[in-house]
Amino acid sequence: MPELPEVEVVRRGLLPLVGAEVEAVEVLDERALRRHQPGAADFEARLTGTVLGEPARRGKFLWVPLARRGQPEQDALLVHLGMSGQLLLDDEWRPHRHERVRIALDGRILVFADQRTFGSLALDPLTGPAAIPSQVAHIALDPLDPAFVPPAVVRRMRARRTELKRALLDQSLVSGIGNIYADEALWAARLHPRQPTATMSAQAARRVLEESRHVMERALAEGGTSFDALYVNVNGQSGYFSRSLTAYGRDGKPCLRCGRALVRETFTNRSSHFCPRCQRLR
DNA sequence: ATGGTGACCTGGAGGC
DNA sequence: TGCCTCCAGGTCACCA
């Protein structure tokens, strides 16, 4: 499932396309444009003829600024991979399972494929001094962003009256963390997923943010995580990182620190995997 | 402000 | 073998 590291791998895979001009766009499944209200015809018409700028990312959102010849960048091609989205870059077109959108640029083909169709492309205006797509404006900085300031996030986190895992998954507090890396970071920081944020120490809050950054940096170094081969990076090569997981999906297996069997609990419609001995409520 | 739930989807796994 | 139900995930809308 694409979380921050996987999205960053895709962003890097798009770098060779900077300066490429979009020659043709074909939307094969309009559900891939759920974030683009005006619809497929508008998307195809407005994307065609643009020149790609340098891809950027915040959290799990990825975007490519678009320029028209002689005009400044005002819009971006926004990409959210959702659960199963892939961007595939090929020298020639070949059919692909779950293919939703095809973009031809400078002799190459960029394919957006997405089995579960939770992902979406969109054309979105760049807004504000930071030139962020409007749909990303409410998304907080992620732990890998150079502008990420841990003490500020610690303050905001402890001011909330909610549970820690809920806070980690709240993209308006800190972005890029999904269910997998949340469980990994909580295990590494020895914190219980249902720890109330209001009663945790500032030190504990700093620790879990640090571990979030660390686990995602490590995943990035290994090329991203994948579980069911749905996730493929921009060149069609599968990233596979699951052997490095210490908590997620390991319920019933021994904790790698203390040996106690990890447990799985469901809340907020999600599974949490944690060690009942190492990760106590405080 | 916060929590809870459902909607959006597909296909793999497991039960019978 | 086949049919059925359940489950996974991220985001957002909506209601309490």
Image (spheres, coloured by chain):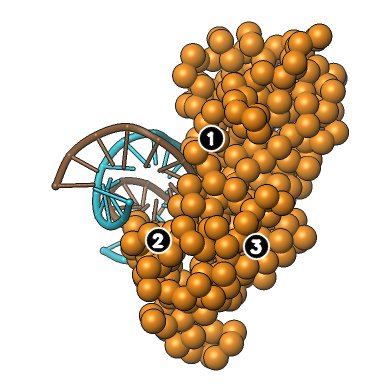
Chain colours: A orange, B cyan, C brown
Counting other residues with Cα less than 10 Å from the Cα at mark 3, is it few (<14), some (14-19), or many (20 or more)? many
> Depth-wise, is mark 1 or mark 2 nearer the camera?
2
Tell me, for residue A213, which label it has, or none: 3
Q: Chain of mark 3?
A: A
Residue A112 location in percent, x, y? 64, 31
Q: Of label 1 and label 2, which has the lower sequence position?
A: 1
Amino acid type at mark 1: Ala
Answer whether residue A240 is visible to the viewer in this image: no
Image side of residue A268 versus residue A206, left or right: left
> In terms of sequence position, does the residue under pointer 3 or pointer 2 come before the other?
2
Return the chain for callout 1: A
Q: CA distance from mark 1 to mark 3?
A: 21 Å
Q: Which residue has dot 2 on it?
A: A159
Task: Please say if the residues under marks 1 and 2 sit with CB atoms less than 8 Å apart.
Answer: no
| Helix, strand or loop under label 3 | helix
Q: Which chain does the numbered disc 2 sit on? A: A
| Nearest to the observer: residue A101 or residue A120 | A120
Between tags 1 and 3, which lies in front?
Answer: 1
For the residue carrying disc 1, how many other residues have a C-alpha within 10 Å: few (<14), some (14-19), or many (20+)? some
Which of discs 3 and 2 lies nearer the camera? The answer is 2
Q: Which mark is residue A254?
A: none
Q: Residues within 10 Å of mark 2 (few under 14, many from 20)?
A: few
Q: Is residue A136 above or below residue A40?
A: below
SS for callout 2? helix
Q: CA distance from mark 3 to mark 2?
A: 21 Å
Residue sitting at x 55%, y 91%: A258
In this view, C1 is above or below A263 = above
The kind of residue on which mark 2 rests is Ala
Q: Is residue A186 left or right of residue A200?
A: right
Q: Residue at x 39, y 81 (%)?
A: A282
Check disc 3 and give the amino acid type: Arg
